[in-house]
Image (spheres, coloured by chain):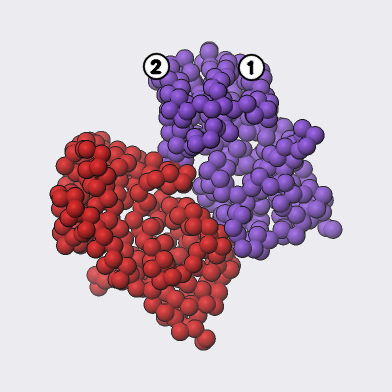
Chain colours: A purple, B red
Amino acid sequence: MGYETVELGGGARAAELRAEARDVAEAVGRVRLVVVVATDDESTAWYVRSITRAAEKVGIDCTTVRLPPDAAPAAIRQELLALSADPTVHGVILQTPLPPGASAADLAGAIAPEKDVDGANPLSLGRLAAGLPAFAPATAEAVVSLLDAHGIALAGRSVAVVGRSTVVGKPLAHLLLDRDATVTVCHSRTADLAAATRTADIVVAAAGRPGLIRGEHLAPGSVVVDVGTNATEDGGLTGDVDAESVAGRAAALSPVPGGVGPVTTALLLRHTALAAQRAAAGGQ
Amino acid sequence: MGYETVELGGGARAAELRAEARDVAEAVGRVRLVVVVATDDESTAWYVRSITRAAEKVGIDCTTVRLPPDAAPAAIRQELLALSADPTVHGVILQTPLPPGASAADLAGAIAPEKDVDGANPLSLGRLAAGLPAFAPATAEAVVSLLDAHGIALAGRSVAVVGRSTVVGKPLAHLLLDRDATVTVCHSRTADLAAATRTADIVVAAAGRPGLIRGEHLAPGSVVVDVGTNATEDGGLTGDVDAESVAGRAAALSPVPGGVGPVTTALLLRHTALAAQRAAAGGQ
């Protein structure tokens, strides 16, 4: 069908980022990341273990603070404030899902911006949008980092972002605008998704719906980044893109797993190492 | 040419908003807005005088704090912090342009969010993006308010926002996404502006370039909102849309002056009255 769809793997870029994190962590000495968890969700536990292992490999101490799955928002906020005030902690992540009634964006406002290594505090998002220094949400930044790693230009190109979440779609739109891309944000209420995505040079699927993006959603020769991390019945992971259907039509596709995911984890570690470096430089 | 282009005037909506502001201000008692100015720019002075007059008409006391046009950023920040701490002040606006070297977004971080009636603090923008309560930048909110006033639906429709400023384009994108529109943000580096805007149901011109949007940029029957406020040589105001060229092709066009402008000013007053009401309710 014209295109030999190239795979945009994240492994090499992730390895580079981990090496940077390791170098910074070694130079700084002790670097500590804390993940706050308030759920019994098994896939969350799996994800947190994978971050912990990755952190240890680059010399970052990663500990988990477990709160009960019915923790009150005030208790979660209290924990985040305490970690924000603790000079031995350099990075703080508030893991989702949260107990019913707790708002991730609202609670993340309690994470000190300089320790907000996953860009979850609304202040981080606002500063990002305003062009001021801030940590971007790691998944959003991973999309740009993966495209950069594969030499895919963004300036002047049209990008359709499918999904308008506070953690991926919206911050990614700002990162892409900052790189001079023309950005369209589509979502579940978009009247004609295929019409919106078919004019784009690059399509980023971040809707959390398995198989949402198919060949007919793409202009021939476009680049597709799959940000979906949907659990499969057999305990595996599947993206938002129907890889079989886009093969031969897309010029390139980032796989799930093995694309954006490893870059995201590596960026979290790099952010944490940088936060520790800045804290050390600031005499904290 | 098929379309009798309807004028989307802002006068009626502005009058409604001013009446709401007047009612709230009367109920609260004393309401005070302070505009911080650090420029000798004549069109800025004109704009501030028009806000002051409009405020007085609805019973809001509006005072201007003048700093020299070469004020240091630290001095401006100090003033904003003092006003944020002053319980007699309910709304604070940092007027642009600012002295060379001063960043509006960075300095606006010193405006207390509850007094940030023009949504200039990056925290306000981030909260807006995250779906949390915050004052939106008045100009961005005015676009949505004007469209609502004229019964133009947003859900499921495609909107092209031309301009990616922190004060209009970016916050407007979030307001439109929140209303279930599909949003494309275009800008000076967009490769083919007409291609991006011609597929939109609604085009918002907020680039600050007189005459940028012409008939060929529009799908027949689309709605155009002109946010441009460009000074003309004779001391007047002109928008970003070439009104003559789009007549007969657009179904509707908001004029400059008389469209978004009066709604913007009225929203600033309404925000200030609401801020005072909340402060009174909070016992401040």
Chain where mark 1 sits: A
- Horizontally, residue A103 falls left or right of residue B16, namely right
Q: Residue B204's image quarter? A: bottom left
Secondary structure category for the residue under label 1: helix
Tell me residue A213's x, y (percent).
Answer: 72, 53
Chain where mark 2 sits: A
Query: Mark 2 vs mark 1: which is more N-terminal?
Result: 1
Q: Are there few (<14), some (14-19), or many (20+) residues within 10 Å of tag 2? A: few
Q: Tag 1: residue type?
A: Glu
Label count reads 2
Tell me residue B192's x, y (percent).
Answer: 57, 64
Q: Which residue is mark 1?
A: A56
**A69 and A17: which one is in front?**
A69
Residue B156 in view in this figure: yes
Specify whether disc 2 shares its chain with disc 1. Answer: yes
Identity of the residue drawn at 45% across and 58% down = B163
Q: Quadrant of the C terminus of chain B?
A: top left
Q: Which residue is mark 2?
A: A283
Residue B101 in view in this figure: no
User: Quick one: which residue is furthest to the right in this view?
Assistant: A1
User: Quick one: which residue is furthest to the top in this view?
Assistant: A29
